[in-house]
Image (spheres, grey):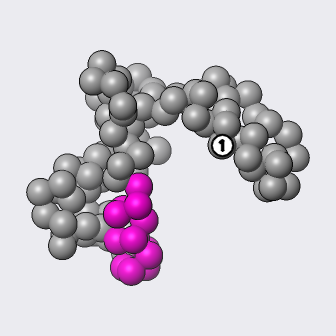
Amino acid sequence: MVRVGEPVQRQVERSLLDGPGRGFVLLAANSDLNKRSTRASVRATIPALFPEKADQPWGYLDPVQWRNFGGWMVDNKLLNDLPDINSAITGDLLPGAGL
């Protein structure tokens, strides 16, 4: 996960400066990715990677938002049970944190 996290962080930083370059770092890190869908995923995901509060690190996962998302997944029969969100999310694998 750490190996994936660092290219994602670099891609986010690059995308902010170079819109047409979106997806390049991820595509360079994994040639099996589809170019079109990777660029679309990066474009859609970038806003979610920036926390709302300045004191939260890049990639912060809000437990309340994820609990709500998990509830939506249960309601739509994508999950059988709501997972323990506090056990499911961690910042430990983000670049510069935890490990």
Which one is nearer the viewer's eye here, 98 or 83? 83
Q: Amino acid at mark 1?
A: Phe
Number of callouts? 1
Q: Position of residue 31 (x, y in %)?
A: 37, 75
| Residue 80 in magenta stretch | no
Dot 1: element: helix
Which one is nearer the viewer's eye here, 24 or 29? 24
Q: Residue at x 75, y 49 (%)?
A: 73
Q: Position of residue 94 (x, y in %)?
A: 38, 35
Can the viewer see residue 55 in this picture? Answer: yes
Q: Residue at x 75, y 40 (%)?
A: 71
Question: Splitting the image into 4 quarters, where does residue 49 fall?
Answer: top left
- Image: 48 above or below 36: above
Residue bearing the label numbered 1? 69
| Residue 37 in magenta stretch | yes
Q: Position of residue 45 (x, y in %)?
A: 41, 55
- Image: 89 above or below 79: above
The answer to whether residue 25 is left or right of residue 86 is left
Q: Residue at x 12, y 57 (%)?
A: 17
Neighbour tally class for label 1: few under 14, some 14-19, many 20 plus, Cα within 10 Å: few
- Image: 87 above or below 17: above
The answer to whether residue 7 is left or right of residue 80 is left
Can the viewer see residue 94 in this picture? Answer: no
Q: Position of residue 7 (x, y in %)?
A: 30, 53
Residue sticking out furthest to the left? 17
Q: Residue at x 44, y 75 (%)?
A: 37
Magenta stretch, residue numbers: 33-45
- Image: 96 above or below 6: above
